[in-house]
């Protein structure tokens, strides 16, 4: 039985790993920056990722070194994948990070998947996602989002929002609309 073919994204990243510093003196700085650049290029250029690619990339190519040490620093790649609409990269990252999609109702009711830096209305204010947090007591994925004082840019309030909170808020809003329509 033949081995499944690697995705284009994995193939390109492996190529850089195999050949980085071939013509120069070895430098971890060069390796680290090259790997981050080629991963960003694979994402932003819309290359296809397989579901296990982020796991394979992190484990096979010393991702703990060049990915700026751990999952939270790798959020930059998730944000790039979401912003680039590269859904295969998004789903591969979510599989690797062990979380599902976090989809909120954005402005004008348009649903969108959030990443670090995403903004959406919550609790009557605009909030910005600053990080993903551990699952809550119900096993629901959570984000940390903050509202800011416009004049100073300082954090006004910090929110820990779970996927269940989003679902509950969406249901409450729909119920409110239905009640207004009846009256």
Image (cartoon, grey):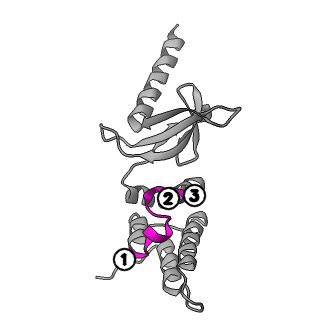
Numbered label tally: 3
Q: Nearer the viewer, mark 1 or mark 2?
A: 2
Q: Nearer the viewer, mark 1 or mark 3?
A: 3
Query: Could you tell whether 10 is left or right of 37 in the image?
Result: left
Mark 2 or mark 3: whose residue is earlier in sequence: 2
Q: Answer above or below: position of 171 versus 43.
A: above
The picture places residue 22, in percent across and down from the top left corner, at 55, 91
Q: Answer above or below: position of 183 versus 32.
A: above
Secondary structure at badge 3 equals helix
**What is the quadrant of residue 142 in the picture?**
top left
Tag 1 and tag 2, C-beta contact below 8 Å: no
Query: Mark 3 — residue?
Result: 80
Query: Mark 1 — residue?
Result: 4
Locate the N terminus and report the quarter of the image it occupies: bottom left
> For the view shown, which residue lies furthest in the top direction?
183
Tag 1 and tag 3, C-beta contact below 8 Å: no
Q: CA distance from mark 2 to mark 3?
A: 12 Å
Q: Residue at x 43, y 61 (%)?
A: 70
The picture places residue 156, in percent across and down from the top left corner, at 58, 31
The picture places residue 97, in percent across and down from the top left corner, at 39, 56
Q: CA distance from mark 1 to mark 3?
A: 27 Å
Mark 1 or mark 2: whose residue is earlier in sequence: 1
Q: Label 3 neighbourhood size at 10 Å, few (<14), some (14-19), many (20+)?
A: some
Q: Which residues are magenta?
A: 60-76
Query: Which residue occupies the foreground of this view, 112 or 65?
Result: 65
Secondary structure at badge 1 equals loop
| Magenta part, dominant SS | helix
Mark 1 or mark 3: whose residue is earlier in sequence: 1
Secondary structure at badge 2 equals helix
Q: Residue at x 56, y 76 (%)?
A: 29
């Amino acid at each position: 039985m033949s081995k499944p073919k690697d995705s284009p994204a994995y193939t390109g990243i492996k190529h850089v790993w195999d050949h980085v510093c071939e013509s120069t003196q070895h430098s971890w700085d060069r390796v680290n920056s090259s790997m981050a650049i080629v991963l960003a290029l694979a994402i932003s250029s819309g290359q296809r990722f397989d579901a296990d690619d982020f796991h394979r990339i992190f484990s096979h190519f010393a991702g703990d070194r060049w990915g700026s040490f751990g999952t939270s620093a790798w959020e930059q790649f998730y944000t790039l994948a979401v912003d680039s609409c590269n859904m295969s990269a998004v789903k591969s990252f979510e599989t690797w990070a062990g979380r599902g999609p976090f989809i909120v109702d954005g402005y004008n009711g348009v649903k969108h998947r959030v990443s670090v830096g995403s903004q959406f209305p919550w609790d009557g204010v605009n909030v910005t996602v600053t990080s993903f947090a551990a699952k809550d007591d119900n096993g629901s994925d959570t984000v940390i989002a903050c509202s800011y004082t416009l004049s100073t840019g300082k954090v006004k309030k910090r929110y820990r929002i779970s996927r269940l909170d989003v679902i509950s808020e969406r249901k409450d809003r729909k119920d409110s609309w239905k009640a207004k329509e009846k009256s």
